[in-house]
């Protein structure tokens, strides 16, 4: 129920007068409406402090001192009892100096709360103490906790016209971290306001089946999981607290098990806002540990730990989130807090990588990461989650490809030597004859392979009839190159028009070579070269195909006649090959001594300095062996390196299915 500003002001004045409040006596005929956390029909914010105390109903086993003070309308006694109740059972590594900073993990989910976010930033700053030999700046924040937090409490307590979910999270977080250290009048003001907001939130919260698809999953998790659980813990003496704890625990557990695979890989749908989704899970866990309340089963806590470990390599070395789709997220603070909460050692791959990213963010050199072989490979893939991470190693200079394939267009996020290279939708337009092929709503993973040489994933989309499109991604784990390709097959012999684009990351300069169809991508500290292997190298040779670029995308168009088409693009960023001469051409493929057309099988060769690669793809299986440049194979896909004798040393071989 909205409250007018004049009424709110007069009530606040009544509450702030301790002498008036403590001496107030209830009239014999007054019968206050009972106040509980669930099912309360009264607007708590509109009541004087004494009426609130006397109207409160209590959980069985509630603190007797608090109950007695409330029954007598003794605000002073109630404040003292509250401060004792907020003494943490376990402080862990938490500090009141970080008060409010945990709420900021979710600020990006509430863009209208920027002003409150600024207040939280100030409160969560340093204590204001000067270092030895330094003068304290006059514009430093007040050094005492009470002084720093007072403007925030005043700002939060103004929100009496409705529930601000972000403000409620902030109120609960301040109570959890600093309740025992606040001045008595500050604690009472914040406690009373938060109680009123919790009651109002619980009264208006929709049921489990009423999901608004326009509200992000992370916001719903805060509303249905974190707020009820944390409120139940912090208001444990008030009637309804146990029900809120149970309600919140159920919602938190459900969202964790429904959105993470058994190995912790988050569902692809969650990757875009992964740090925002993790934030309420971690905050609730920290509160549970601080007040010694059970939140997770052993299996659930292990799953959350695994999810944090899977999330850490998705924080790029620049501190930005992988596949964030333009969202300005800062995943580093929540991941650091989660790693500390789970005691991930700095010598572990995940802990060491996170510490390196943290050092880079602070302007310090990254830690050196030692390779320990395939036992702790950073790559992983989940059919269920529709997500894969291809990665060369655990260092901040790693090459990596994150790919989510839960939508009509797969999304990729590529880093080269730790620098962002590609980021966004990998588009596809396909026309067979005069008909535009309608893409399926999602792609499935039909092949995954990870070994010390390379990581490989193949995605498949089935079109009408027998038409299939396979998307091939192969990342070398040792030689700094990436192969991206589309394979179109099962076409009734006809004209095929293929067009795909690859999304460039921000701040990349593109240069198209004039003599050849090579493209060069330049950014600070890195140069990458791009080769469309199925196109003729020299621009002077006429071709129906095109390889072009804009400021934000590379574009490849190919035309073919027949039953299929293979469209490979190779990226190379090895520092020793940035100026090396490049030569590439399509190869002749034979079967039983007869030449096979490119719509049946295609082979390509790239010579780049001392690197010579073979890329082969069979588009139609006849069960016979095929030969390309002297290499005989029955495999569907082969990527290999030519040795000095001209033989092919396979990097990748995929059997035909």
Image (spheres, helix red, strand yellow):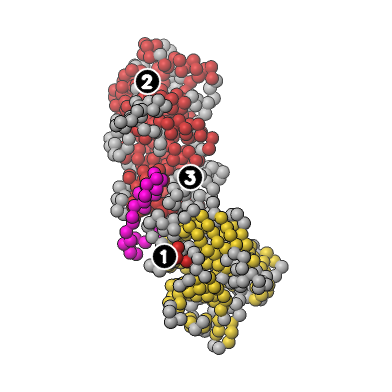
Q: Nearer the viewer, residue 312 or 367?
A: 367
Name the front one of labels 2 and 3: 3
Q: Quadrant of residue 169 in the image?
A: top left
Decide which of 571, 35 is in the foreground and name it. 571
- Closer to the eye: label 1 or 3: 1
For the question of whether residue 112 can be seen, the reply is yes
- The residue lying at 51 percent from left, 55 percent from top is 523
Nearer to us of marks 1 and 2 is 1
- Dot 2 corresponds to which residue? 185
Q: Quadrant of residue 451?
A: bottom left
Task: Kindly identify the residue that appears in the image at 67 percent across and 72 percent down.
Answer: 542
- Residue for badge 3: 329
| Residues rendered magenta in the picture | 353-382
Q: Along the polypeptide, which appears first: circle 1 or circle 3?
A: 3
What residue did someone put label 1 on?
A: 477
In magenta stretch: residue 148? no
Q: Secondary structure at mark 3?
A: loop
């Amino acid at each position: 129920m909205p409250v007018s500003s004049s009424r709110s002001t007069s009530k606040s004045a009544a509450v702030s007068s301790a002498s008036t409040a403590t001496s107030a006596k209830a009239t014999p005929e007054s019968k206050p409406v009972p106040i509980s956390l669930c099912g309360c029909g009264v607007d708590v914010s509109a009541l004087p402090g004494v009426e609130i105390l006397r109207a409160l109903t209590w959980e069985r086993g509630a603190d007797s001192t608090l109950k007695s003070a409330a029954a007598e309308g003794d605000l002073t006694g109630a404040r003292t009892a509250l401060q004792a109740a907020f003494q943490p059972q376990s402080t862990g590594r938490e500090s009141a100096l970080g008060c409010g900073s945990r709420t900021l993990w979710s600020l990006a989910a509430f863009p209208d709360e920027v002003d409150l976010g600024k207040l939280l930033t100030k409160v969560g700053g340093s204590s204001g103490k000067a270092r030895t030999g330094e003068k304290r700046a006059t514009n430093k924040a007040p050094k005492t906790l009470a002084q720093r937090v007072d403007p925030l409490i005043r700002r939060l307590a103004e929100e009496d016209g409705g529930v601000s979910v972000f403000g409620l999270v902030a109120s609960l977080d301040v109570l959890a971290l600093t309740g025992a250290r606040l001045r008595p009048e500050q604690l009472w003001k914040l406690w009373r306001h938060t109680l009123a907001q919790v009651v109002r939130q619980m009264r208006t919260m929709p049921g489990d089946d009423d999901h608004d698809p326009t509200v992000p999953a992370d916001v719903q998790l805060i509303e249905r999981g974190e707020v009820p659980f944390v409120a139940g813990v912090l208001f444990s003496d008030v009637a309804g607290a146990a029900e809120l704890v149970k309600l919140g625990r159920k919602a938190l557990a459900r969202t964790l098990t429904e959105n993470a695979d058994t190995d912790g890989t988050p569902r692809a749908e969650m990757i875009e806002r992964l740090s925002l989704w993790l934030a309420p899970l971690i905050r609730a866990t920290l509160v549970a540990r601080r007040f010694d309340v059970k939140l997770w089963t052993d299996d659930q806590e292990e799953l959350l730990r695994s999810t944090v470990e899977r999330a850490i390599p998705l924080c790029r070395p620049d501190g930005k989130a992988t596949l964030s789709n333009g969202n300005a997220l800062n995943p580093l603070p929540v991941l650091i807090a989660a790693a500390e909460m789970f005691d991930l050692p700095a010598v572990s791959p995940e802990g060491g990588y996170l510490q390196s990213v943290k050092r880079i963010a602070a302007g310090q050199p990254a830690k050196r990461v030692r390779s320990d072989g395939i036992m702790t490979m950073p790559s992983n893939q989940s059919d269920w989650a529709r997500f894969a991470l291809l990665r060369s190693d655990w260092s901040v200079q790693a090459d990596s490809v994150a790919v989510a394939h839960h939508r009509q267009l797969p999304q990729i996020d590529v880093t080269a030597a730790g620098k962002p290279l590609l980021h966004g939708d990998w588009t596809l337009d396909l026309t067979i004859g005069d008909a535009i092929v309608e893409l399926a709503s999602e792609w499935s993973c039909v092949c995954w392979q990870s070994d010390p040489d390379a990581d490989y994933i193949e995605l498949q989309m089935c079109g009408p009839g027998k038409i299939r499109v396979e998307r091939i991604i192969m990342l070398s784990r040792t030689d700094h190159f990436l192969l991206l390709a589309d394979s179109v097959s099962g076409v009734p012999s006809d004209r095929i028009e293929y067009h795909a684009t690859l999304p460039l990351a921000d701040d990349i300069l593109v240069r198209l070579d004039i003599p050849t169809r090579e493209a060069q991508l330049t950014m600070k500290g890195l140069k990458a070269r791009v080769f469309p292997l199925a196109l003729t190298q020299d621009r002077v040779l006429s071709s129906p195909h095109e390889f072009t670029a804009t400021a934000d995308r590379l574009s490849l168009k190919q035309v073919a006649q027949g039953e299929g088409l293979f469209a490979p693009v190779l990226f190379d960023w090895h520092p020793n090959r940035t100026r090396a001469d490049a030569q590439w051409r399509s190869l002749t493929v034979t079967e039983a001594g007869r030449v096979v057309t490119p719509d049946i099988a295609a082979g390509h060769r790239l010579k780049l300095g001392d690197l010579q690669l073979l890329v082969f793809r069979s588009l139609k299986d006849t069960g016979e062996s095929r030969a390309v440049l002297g290499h005989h194979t029955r495999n569907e896909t082969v990527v290999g390196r030519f040795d000095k004798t001209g033989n092919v040393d396979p990097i990748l071989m995929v059997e035909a299915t």
